[in-house]
Image (spheres, helix red, strand yellow):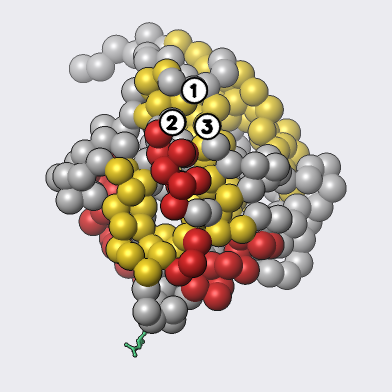
Amino acid sequence: MLLIHIITALLALVCVLQETQAWGYKNGILHNSIWLEQAAGVYHRESRKGRYQLTFKEAKAVCKFEGGSLATYDQLEAARQIGFHVCAAGWFDKGRVGYPIVKAGSNCGFGKIGIVDYGYRLNKSEKWDVYCYNPKSKECGGVHTDQEKILQSPSYPDEYPDDQICYWHIRVRYGQKIHLQFLDFDIEDDTDCISDYLEIYDSYDDVSGFSGRFCGDDLPEDFISAGNVMTLKFLTDSSVSAGGFRLQYTARFHSTVRP
Ligand SMILES: *[C@@H]1O[C@H](CO)[C@@H](O)[C@H](O)[C@H]1NC(C)=O
């Protein structure tokens, strides 16, 4: 399982590593350290097995499960224009595959800006990620820039739903660190936290800075980021749910003296 995780991470790295100078626009404002996970009702999902694991049929089911549908080209482009930038190809409407690029990078998007379009795929068994559209989608992750905030699993305090992948990207002011404090924690317990889990990444994405995977009902210890960004990833499989989690993050300035 660890091996699969490493391989998946390495594959993702090929595409994403070049993006560590992250940045993005939201509501017309340039943010210097994160890309948007959702914009104009469009969001990106990967399979719970990792990147590039969804056939066209499965991709449609993923969107439908969350009450949405496959994004159209125009919806994806509208989201891109307000900063939706994802370095991962996914299915969208009518069996087309592509991804939205806002800023040209040498290793992602062939230096192009716009929708990188792989066209209508003849082979619907090919496996990609997916771009869904649902202007009323429920709170599941997002980009958070407040100085402090409570974050919780979808539907909390009720049990969380099955088949979720949520990303919370936290970005506070330059020079600040993020203090994470768990207030409540109850995620389906198994030996290696394979079924459902919460992961902490000491970076703005889930590629670098892996800092722990948690399940069960012990409160994880407080966590302090190294820099001013952090990512939380919550993944649930298709069976067995639990009460979920609730945590608080607080931004604090640290006067660290480095040797
Ligand atoms: C379609 O794609 C799948 C997955 O990549 C592959 O296994 C299969 O051989 C392809 N079929 C054709 C006819 O190319």
Residue 68: image quadrant is: bottom right
Residue 198 is at least partly visible in this image: no
Callout 3 environment at 10 Å: few (<14), some (14 to 19), or many (20+)? Answer: some
Query: What amino acid does circle 2 point to?
Result: Ile
Q: Nearer the viewer, mark 3 or mark 2?
A: 2
Callout 2 environment at 10 Å: few (<14), some (14 to 19), or many (20+)? Answer: some
Query: What amino acid does circle 1 point to?
Result: Asn
Residue 113: image quadrant is: top left
Mark 1 = which residue?
A: 27
The residue positioned farthest toward the front in the image shown? 74
Instruction: Give the mark, 1 or 3, whose residue is nearer the N terminus.
Output: 1
Q: Is residue 178 above or below residue 223?
A: above
The residues bearing labels 2 and 1 have C-alpha atoms spaced at a distance of 6 Å
Q: Disc 2 vs disc 1: Cβ atoms closer than 8 Å?
A: yes
> How far from the left and from the top, in percent, is residue 138?
70, 43
The residue positioned farthest toward the right in the image shown? 158
Callout 1 environment at 10 Å: few (<14), some (14 to 19), or many (20+)? Answer: few
Q: Is residue 13 above or below residue 50?
A: above
Task: Report helix, strand or loop for mark 2.
Answer: loop
Of the pair 112 and 5, the residue shown nearer to us:
112
Task: Report helix, strand or loop for mark 3.
Answer: strand
Q: Disc 1 vs disc 3: Cβ atoms closer than 8 Å?
A: no
Residue 244 is at least partly visible in this image: yes
Q: Quadrant of the C terminus?
A: top left
Label 3 CB sits under 8 Å from any ligand 1 atom: no
Q: Which mark is residue 9?
A: none
Q: Nearer the viewer, mark 1 or mark 3?
A: 1
Query: What amino acid does circle 3 point to?
Result: Val
Mark 3 = which residue?
A: 143
39 sits left or right of 191 in the view:
left
Q: Quadrant of ligand 1?
A: bottom left
Mark 2 = which residue?
A: 82
